[in-house]
Image (spheres, helix red, strand yellow):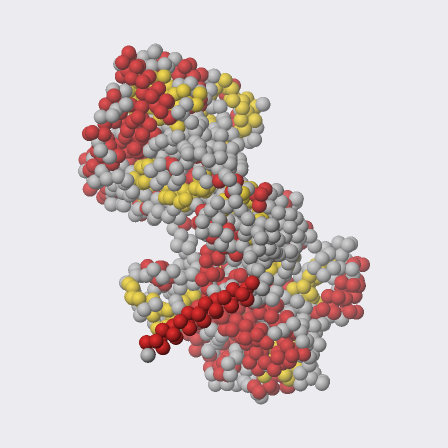
């Protein structure tokens, strides 16, 4: 399922490393850029590239937060639920996204655009509540701001500039 | 040597001993889950907490993580430590299901024991229990993840110890899941050890599933007789059936573990699931008779034939699955009665290889599997370990984990669960390769110190061996061998040339002369090849050499004792014709073999689980298997009948040696020989020499101190390159399916490897064949169809055919065949 | 004199002793008798009486016995033999279950040991047979169609092993861990 | 006294300092002097040791001592790892630092590598700092172009290169040994020393793991001398400045560079705008989620390693999370425990099973199902989880232990009222 182009690119990346396993996370993050999540087939092909068994790669994939072993939407929204964000209303953010954009918590919106997941502290405690969308961070969330950011993504497929 | 005090008892232990082990030496069993002697300490379960009162450390610490040091005062009963251990049990139990009654581990569960002993009886945790879905892991191992206590023993055993990569921990936190990437059979042929190693019931033994509890089992120490290694087992029986086999710890042989063939290949003794596959009753011409009638018939017929045609018209066949008692009895009877034999082997070449190997072993050079684990350089010559002697592969893996260099010189596409350098040399080239490797490791100074015979041998060794295809530099490896201190040569006796076993011994000898602690380890065919070699002499014949006499009518009676020529004699039609010419075919066996079907008189013999017996493994270690149960038709599987009987159905079997003695009518024998021990010692003088005339012999090796190892001048190996176009077809063993008696175990039938013919990919390309093709191979007596597997990592010009039950390879005329290219076709 | 006195006292004691026992007899003549006319009249026994053994069923009508072998292990006379088996759905059951009542001493230890409350002793104590084999009770003879003394208990609801349905559906369980879950 | 700016010297709103700006402020001078001038690596270690620089990642281990622990005859290659896996709740100083002056970190890494002759540096960064990772990659390339990085730095013959290694995101990856496993592509479970990473780290080679902020201090110390660095601190035992990140109920949360030992009161009131209107200081966690609650009793404590240790607390990462009188600390602790239970790697029993147990009890207390006996259970578990494999569980127990020590009344109030007096909502 991985394109030959992508495989070539990954092979090059692996060749540069001290040991091929070192690049396991990078390979998976890269594959996710193209295929959004790590399906079983993707895992098998990635494992082959890395010289690991699919299980060995899965040991890592299921360990990490930002590797998705289940299907996700085009934009994965991680809302921080650790101390500061929780104090500043992470639940309101979750609820707002969930109701306004029809995304079940922990699931994906029917249009396949958004996936909503909680995440532990993302280091934006000074701008709580915060969220990460495809590894871009947004802080000091308000319902209006969320609407702007997600609206823009849904409408124009463009990331809102950080404020 | 640190001295420490544990629970007011003082002990001195070697440096590096963990406190948990030091306590064990004092008889104090500190609770543990993750710690296992074979796997080492990782400190995951935190169960082995003890309090350090004095010394370099203070407070509650994990006894598995701490080396014993001078001045330590340790208390295992300190309240703080006891409370902590109790808490650990509480933590482990918050998610453990309430399923002991339906769990097969119940009654032999470490978690159960520790929970009871810690006093934890009531669940206080107010939350709900975590659950997991299970995976299908194949026909041997059942998976129940809800019971997991996350000690990581399974993944550590499976990945680190045994070297397979398809079972491990997934997820994080309290959701960690031990399983496979996808459901399916575990790849490891050592998967059964998960059952033993798991401290609770996550992995349970499927063949024994729901059949019996540990407390109802009759247990006895036994020995595995499937391959020559003689791994130690525990036989477990109930209701007249062997229910399961477990590994028995023997530090010199198998350690804590066992391969799946040895563990699950026992059901032949029960006659399979329906109990009908084993011949339970004595028979004359196919009809069931009493034991006495059959014995009388055999005795009178043998006497009659001896009287008419002379005793030389009677031949006794033995085999390499006979016990030492049976072999000694056979040997004695043949001599006293004047019968021909005993015959141990079918293939004369194999016989000579086994004999030359056994002759060359001496106690200085023979190594046990344990010693292989500490080798720093291992050369495997002409042996496919995973298929021929699986646990030896596990021993080499341990050496590999300690950074030993492993070289395999074998023409087959070998796969092993560790990194190794494979030189796919043709059988005729193995000596050349081995010789040049050894020669390169001998420095000039060392050469000077050698005596003349060693010097002569060394000089005659080939200097160069080119191995283009594998791209391996022999000289580089020689350099590594030069710096090795404990090299071991593992030599097979299957596909190698006849001179190779002795040559390997010479090489090991030479390495020893050069100051290394070199070892030699043979892989022999069958459980008791070693003793059969000891019992034979230069004039001992093989079955192939006896067969013409049968065909000529010189031999009228054959006594086959646990011996089935149909198992490994190639030309089945010829064999069938020859056996039909006999006046008498007496068969003593416990397996439903082809020979049993043709028997004139059949006597059921006891399996290893049903008698006390002795076996000598390939390094000369004498091991005793105790009787596990009396045997008979098992009761399980169907409702037991509502009748009262005074006999055991299927209980007619007797040890083969006893049957032999009875049919020989040799009543006077017990006058000269009083006990079995004396019988054995009388037949095999080395027993007398090492003081093994007492019976039973439970431990010890019977190889002489130092046999005169004389170097044989290596013969010039044939020039490389094929003359005629075609392939050399060789028979090879495969795990589960190639060995009596395990191949008769229906528990293994579902895992028999697919019948596959191996061919070099270059050869296959030339013949227009590719991986996975179904091919027809025309042998001399007919064609066989099977799947083709191609590999680059094997010798060119060879075909390897598994000698596996279910493949009708006995269409060959000889033990190997020459196949012209046109005789192998894709279908 | 003293001699006569003592003889008289002895005499008086004897008479009084006789009168005492007559009085008791007399009293009992008018009491309700304790003995019962067995077998014409059969008395009701307490539920906990330790008599003939039965195998009960769970509230769904399934066999309660899971063939855990605890009863046979605890039995002091070794009168219970079992072989366990597994149903297609994974439920354990005894393939056969045999009690030799000729050996049973009705001690009730099997009932105490039973983790699924399957094996129970009943008040039925009348047990005499002509043949020894008639004392060998098979599962068909032991299994009853009711729950015995514990109407509600259903072991498999607590066990934590799935029989039908998915994992995590038993009492006090979380849904099964999804190894591939994206949730942290 | 004016706020001394060292690490944040080149701080610009919404902009990263360029190489030129960094050089103008004295950047790469230390590199030129020490590596270009081929001053013995031992001198670097000596100066750092003398400066009293202690690890900024939380444990406070002296940086020089760590480098010295690499045996002189240790095999090559040797590795340096910069730990930017800042996942302690409340902490974000490294992100601000990387967005302010990445070259400061790069130079620090090169000099640290030089100190024990490392040949390769790994910059291990968490995935939610993707923008910082991108900045780092860009600036590393610039440094490479300028000859500060790569083969034979400044022609000295010393070669050192840095690669950015992105994590998959887990708190445990910040633990030094787990981090090494993560880099090697193994499951990031911690490994208990010995052997220490400085002897057998990445691929069994000597490896030093330092926090990003620690490394950023290195060039400044080498340029200005150890005494200068020591003098930056307000306390006698402390050294240098510290990046304090303050979040919670203050007017202007964020990160500021302040001298080591600045009193808590001054930090809150002077540098972060004071408490929010209507809020009163109730407690704070002075060094991230795995430190103990610090009550108003210690409002004036100087924020330094030793001073906090003296009152039984830890400076940790100096991430101060401030709670006001309206905050329910039971719910807060539950949230922290939820974080730790979720981020446990699952290796040892106390952490894997004990933390969810504690979380469950806190949740029940918070939601009105608490029982008095839970307090004792929690208290004993707080002690018992100290016997876990790594420091995660002991850290996790700190907020709970201090909650039970300083706010037991609040906990009991929850149990008595069968609910939360603050009406806080704890998500389970």
x 23%, y 27%: residue: B669
* Residue placed most toward the observer, B471 or D414: D414
- Whole-percent x, y for residue D24 in the image: 58, 74
Q: Quadrant of residue D143?
A: bottom right
Left or right side of B581 for B785: right
Q: Is residue B718 visible?
A: no
Looking at the image, is D387 positioned above or below residue B771?
A: below
Looking at the image, is B18 positioned above or below residue B591?
A: below
- Whole-percent x, y for residue B194 in the image: 48, 48
- Whole-percent x, y for residue B25 in the image: 32, 59
Q: Is residue B772 visible?
A: yes
x 49%, y 30%: residue: B276
x 71%, y 76%: residue: D423
Q: Quadrant of residue A108?
A: bottom right
x 55%, y 71%: residue: D396
* Residue placed most toward the observer, B335 or B444: B335
| Quadrant in which the C terminus of chain D appears | bottom right
- Whole-percent x, y for residue D181 in the image: 50, 59
| Quadrant in which the N terminus of chain D appears | bottom right
Left or right side of B250 for B456: left
Left or right side of D270 for D150: left
The count of marks equals 0
């Amino acid at each position: 399922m991985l394109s030959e182009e992508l495989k070539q690119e990954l092979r090059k990346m692996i060749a540069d490393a001290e040991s091929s396993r070192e690049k396991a996370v990078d390979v998976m993050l890269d594959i996710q850029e193209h295929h959004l999540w790590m399906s079983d087939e993707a895992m098998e092909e990635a494992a082959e590239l890395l010289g690991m068994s699919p299980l060995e790669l899965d040991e890592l994939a299921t360990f990490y937060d930002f590797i998705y072993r289940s299907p996700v939407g085009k934009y994965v929204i991680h809302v921080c639920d650790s101390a500061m964000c929780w104090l500043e209303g992470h639940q309101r953010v979750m609820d707002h996204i969930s109701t306004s954009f029809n995304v079940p918590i922990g699931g994906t919106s029917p249009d396949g655009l958004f996936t909503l997941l909680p995440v532990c502290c993302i280091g934006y405690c000074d701008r709580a509540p915060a969220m990460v969308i495809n590894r871009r961070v947004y802080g000091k969330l308000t319902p209006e701001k969320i609407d702007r950011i997600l609206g823009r993504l849904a409408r124009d497929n463009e990331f809102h500039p950080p404020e | 040597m640190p001295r420490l005090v544990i629970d007011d008892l003082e002990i001195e232990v070697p440096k590096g001993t963990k406190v948990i082990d030091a306590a064990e030496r004092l008889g104090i069993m500190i609770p543990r889950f993750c710690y296992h002697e074979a796997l080492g300490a990782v400190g995951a379960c935190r169960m082995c907490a003890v309090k350090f009162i004095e010394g370099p450390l203070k407070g509650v610490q994990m006894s598995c993580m701490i080396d014993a040091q001078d001045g330590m005062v340790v208390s295992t009963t300190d309240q703080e430590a006891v409370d902590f251990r109790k808490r650990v049990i509480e933590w482990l139990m918050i998610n453990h299901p309430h399923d002991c009654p339906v769990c097969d581990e119940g009654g032999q569960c470490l978690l159960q024991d520790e929970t009871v002993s810690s006093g934890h009886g009531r669940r206080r945790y107010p939350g709900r229990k975590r659950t997991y879905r299970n995976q299908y892991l194949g026909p041997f191992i059942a998976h129940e993840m809800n019971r997991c206590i996350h000690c990581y023993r399974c993944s550590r055993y499976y990945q680190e110890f045994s070297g397979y990569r398809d079972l491990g921990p997934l997820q994080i936190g309290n959701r960690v899941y031990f399983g496979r990437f996808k459901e399916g059979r575990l790849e490891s042929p050592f998967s059964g050890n998960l059952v033993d190693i798991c401290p609770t019931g996550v992995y349970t033994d499927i063949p024994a599933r729901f059949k019996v509890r540990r407390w109802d089992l009759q247990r006895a120490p036994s020995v595995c007789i499937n391959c020559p290694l003689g791994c130690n087992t525990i036989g477990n029986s109930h209701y007249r059936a062997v229910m399961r086999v477990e590994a028995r710890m023997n530090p010199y042989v198998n350690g804590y573990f066992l391969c799946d063939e040895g563990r699950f290949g026992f059901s032949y003794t029960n006659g399979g699931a329906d109990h009908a596959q084993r011949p339970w009753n004595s028979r004359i011409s196919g009809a069931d008779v009493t034991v006495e009638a059959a014995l009388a018939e055999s005795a009178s017929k043998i006497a009659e034939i001896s009287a008419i045609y002379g005793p030389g018209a009677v031949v006794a066949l033995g085999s390499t699955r006979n016990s030492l008692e049976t072999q000694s009895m056979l040997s004695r009877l043949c001599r006293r009665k004047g019968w021909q034999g005993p015959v141990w082997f079918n293939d004369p070449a194999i016989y000579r290889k086994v004999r030359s190997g056994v002759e060359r072993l001496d106690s200085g050079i023979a190594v046990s599997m344990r010693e292989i684990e500490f080798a720093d350089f291992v050369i495997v010559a002409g042996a496919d370990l995973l298929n021929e002697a699986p646990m030896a592969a596990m021993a080499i893996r341990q050496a590999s984990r300690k950074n030993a260099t492993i070289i395999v010189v074998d023409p087959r596409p070998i796969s092993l669960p560790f990194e190794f350098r494979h030189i796919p040399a043709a059988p005729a080239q193995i000596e050349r390769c081995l010789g040049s490797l050894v020669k390169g490791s001998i420095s000039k100074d060392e050469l000077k110190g050698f005596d003349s015979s060693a010097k002569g041998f060394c000089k005659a060794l080939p200097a160069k061996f080119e191995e283009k295809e594998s791209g391996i530099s022999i000289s580089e490896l020689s350099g590594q061998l030069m710096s090795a201190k404990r090299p071991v040569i593992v030599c097979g006796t299957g596909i190698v040339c006849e001179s190779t076993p002795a040559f390997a011994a010479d090489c090991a000898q030479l390495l020893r002369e050069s100051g290394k602690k070199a070892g030699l380890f043979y892989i022999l065919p069958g459980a008791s090849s070693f003793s059969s070699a000891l019992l034979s002499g230069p004039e001992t014949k093989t079955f192939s050499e006896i067969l013409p006499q049968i065909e000529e009518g010189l031999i009228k009676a054959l006594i086959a004792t646990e011996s089935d020529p149909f198992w490994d004699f190639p030309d089945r039609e010829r064999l069938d014709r020859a056996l039909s010419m006999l006046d008498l075919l007496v068969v003593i066996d416990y397996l439903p073999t082809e020979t049993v079907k043709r028997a004139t008189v059949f006597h059921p013999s006891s399996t290893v689980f049903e008698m006390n017996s002795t076996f000598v493994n390939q390094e000369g270690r004498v091991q005793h298997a105790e009787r596990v149960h009396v045997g008979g038709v098992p009761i399980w599987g169907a409702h037991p009948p509502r009748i009262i009987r005074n006999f055991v159905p299927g209980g007619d079997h007797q040890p083969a040696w006893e049957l032999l003695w009875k049919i020989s009518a040799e009543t006077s024998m017990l006058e000269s020989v009083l006990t079995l021990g004396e019988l054995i010692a009388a037949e095999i003088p080395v027993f007398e020499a090492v003081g093994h005339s007492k019976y039973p012999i439970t431990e010890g090796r019977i190889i002489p101190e130092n046999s005169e190892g004389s170097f044989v001048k290596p013969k010039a190996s044939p020039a490389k390159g094929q003359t005629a176009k075609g392939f050399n077809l060789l028979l090879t063993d495969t795990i589960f399916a190639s060995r009596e008696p395990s191949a008769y175990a229906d528990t293994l039938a579902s895992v028999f490897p697919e019948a596959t013919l191996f061919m070099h990919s270059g050869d296959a390309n030339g013949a227009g064949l590719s991986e996975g093709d179904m091919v027809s191979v025309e042998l001399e007596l007919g064609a066989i169809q099977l799947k083709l597997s191609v590999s680059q990592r094997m010798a060119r010009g060879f075909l390897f055919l598994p000698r596996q039950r279910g493949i009708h390879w006995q269409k060959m005329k000889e033990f190997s065949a020459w196949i012209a290219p046109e005789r192998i076709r894709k279908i | 004199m003293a001699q006569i006195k003592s003889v008289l006292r002895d005499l008086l004691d004897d008479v009084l002793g006789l009168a005492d026992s007559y009085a008791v007899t007399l009293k009992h003549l008018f009491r309700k008798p304790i003995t019962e006319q067995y077998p014409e009249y059969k008395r009701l026994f307490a539920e906990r009486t330790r008599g003939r053994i039965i195998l009960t069923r769970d509230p769904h009508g399934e066999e309660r016995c899971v063939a855990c072998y605890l009863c046979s292990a605890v039995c002091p006379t070794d009168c219970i033999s079992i072989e366990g088996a597994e149903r297609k759905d994974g439920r354990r059951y005894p393939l056969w279950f045999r009690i030799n009542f000729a050996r049973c001493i009705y001690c009730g230890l099997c009932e105490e040991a039973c983790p699924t409350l399957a094996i129970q002793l009943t008040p039925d104590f009348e047990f005499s047979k002509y043949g020894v084999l008639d004392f060998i009770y098979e599962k068909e003879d032991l299994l009853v169609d009711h729950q015995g003394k514990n109407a509600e208990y259903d072991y498999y609801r607590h066990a934590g092993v799935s029989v039908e349905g998915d994992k995590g559906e038993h009492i006090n369980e979380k849904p099964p861990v999804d190894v591939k879950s994206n949730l942290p | 006294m004016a706020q001394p700016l060292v690490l944040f010297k080149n701080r610009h709103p919404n902009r990263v300092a360029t190489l030129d700006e960094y050089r103008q402020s004295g950047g790469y001078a230390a590199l030129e002097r020490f590596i270009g001038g081929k001053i013995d690596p031992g001198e670097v270690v000596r100066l750092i040791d003398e400066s009293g620089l202690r690890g900024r990642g939380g444990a406070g281990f002296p940086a020089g001592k760590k480098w010295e622990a690499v045996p002189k005859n240790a095999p090559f290659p040797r590795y340096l790892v910069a730990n930017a896996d800042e996942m302690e709740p409340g902490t974000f100083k490294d992100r601000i630092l990387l967005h302010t002056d990445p070259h400061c970190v790069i130079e620090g890494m090169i000099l640290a590598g030089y100190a024990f002759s490392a040949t390769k540096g790994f910059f291990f960064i968490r995935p939610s700092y993707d923008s910082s990772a991108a900045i780092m990659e860009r600036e590393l390339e610039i440094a490479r172009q300028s000859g500060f990085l790569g083969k034979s730095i400044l022609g000295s013959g010393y070669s050192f290169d840095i690669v950015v290694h992105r994590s998959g995101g887990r708190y445990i990856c910040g633990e030094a040994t787990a981090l090494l496993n993560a880099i090697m592509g193994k499951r990031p479970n911690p490994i208990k020393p010995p052997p220490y990473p400085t002897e057998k780290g990445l691929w069994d080679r000597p490896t030093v793991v330092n926090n990003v902020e620690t490394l950023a201090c290195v060039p400044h110390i080498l340029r200005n001398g150890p005494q200068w660095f020591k003098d930056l601190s307000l306390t006698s035992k402390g050294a240098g400045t510290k990046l304090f990140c303050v979040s919670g109920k203050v007017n202007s949360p964020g990160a500021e560079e302040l001298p080591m030992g600045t009193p808590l009161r001054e930090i809150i009131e002077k540098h972060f705008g004071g408490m929010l209107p209507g809020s009163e200081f109730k407690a704070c966690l002075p060094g991230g989620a795995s430190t103990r609650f610090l009550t108003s009793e210690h409002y004036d404590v100087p924020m330094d390693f030793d001073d906090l240790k003296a009152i039984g607390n830890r400076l940790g990462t100096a991430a101060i999370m401030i709670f006001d009188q309206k905050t329910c600390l039971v719910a807060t602790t539950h949230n922290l425990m939820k974080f730790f239970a979720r981020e446990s790697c699952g290796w040892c029993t106390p952490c894997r099973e004990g933390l969810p147990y504690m979380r469950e009890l806190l949740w029940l207390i918070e939601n009105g199902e608490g029982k008095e006996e839970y307090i004792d259970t929690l208290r004993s578990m707080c002690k018992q989880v100290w016997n876990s494999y790594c420091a995660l569980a002991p850290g996790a127990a700190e907020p709970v232990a201090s909650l039970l020590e300083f706010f037991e009344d609040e906990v009991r109030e929850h149990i008595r009222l069968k609910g939360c007096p603050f009406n806080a909502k704890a998500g389970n």
